[in-house]
Image (tube, grey):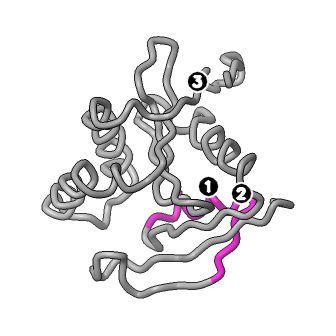
Amino acid sequence: MHEDEPSSGRMPVDLRPTRGPVEYDDLVEVWRQAVVATHAFLTPEDIEDYRVRLGEQWLPAVELHVAVDADDRPVGFLGMDGHRVEMLFVADRGRGRGVGTRLIEWAASRHPVLELDVNEQNPGALAFYESRGFRVVGRSPLDGEGRPFPLLHMRRNEQG
């Protein structure tokens, strides 16, 4: 797959499965850039704790697909568990350039129904998912680690 619209501000990317643990450091850096830019509610200590868990526990637990630039450098990634989007993060250089949309549309092409959770304190992510056909179907007052970061549960049917 290749997205090829540089004139529209879109970043041309290829999507591929992850190369596994040898690539995790690069994916953690993509994650770090995205979290610093979009998760102002997290403290530096929270970010460090999640960073360690990401590389050791969470990346190995999902099916990972990576958006890479022309030099095969990761610019974004998607982690799936069946029809659930467990994680989607885009590096600074790819944000707002169609990378996240490419990853979501790739997932939607394989699963007629997609579900995900988004932090309530991340209005940019909420708007991103809503503009791509996701609707809020529930809320939890705590995140998956039991911390006070409310989650919105979202769902997208094949009609979008």
Q: How crowded is mark 1: few (under 14 residues within 10 Å), some or many (20 or more)?
A: some
Residue under pointer 3: 13
* Residue 85 position by quadrant: bottom right
Q: Quick one: quadrant of the N terminus?
A: top right
**Residue 35, how many percent across, how many down?**
34, 51
Residue under pointer 1: 128
The nearer-to-camera label among 2 and 3 is 3
Q: Which of marks 2 and 3 is nearer the N terminus?
A: 3
Q: What stretch is highlighted in magenta?
A: 122-137
Up-down: is 65 above or below 42?
above
Residue at image coords 46%, 55%: 87
Mark 1 and mark 2: span between their CA atoms? 5 Å
Dots 1 and 2: beta carbons under 8 Å? yes
Residue at the limit of the structure toward the right, as seen here: 159
Image check: 153 left or right of 57?
right
Residue type beneath disc 1:
Phe
Residue at image coords 82%, 60%: 158
Residue type beneath disc 2:
Ser
Up-down: is 157 above or below 143?
above
Residue type beneath disc 3:
Val
Using the image, tell me which numbered label, if any, was put on residue 107: none
Secondary element under disc 1, as helix, strand or loop, is: helix
Residue under pointer 2: 131
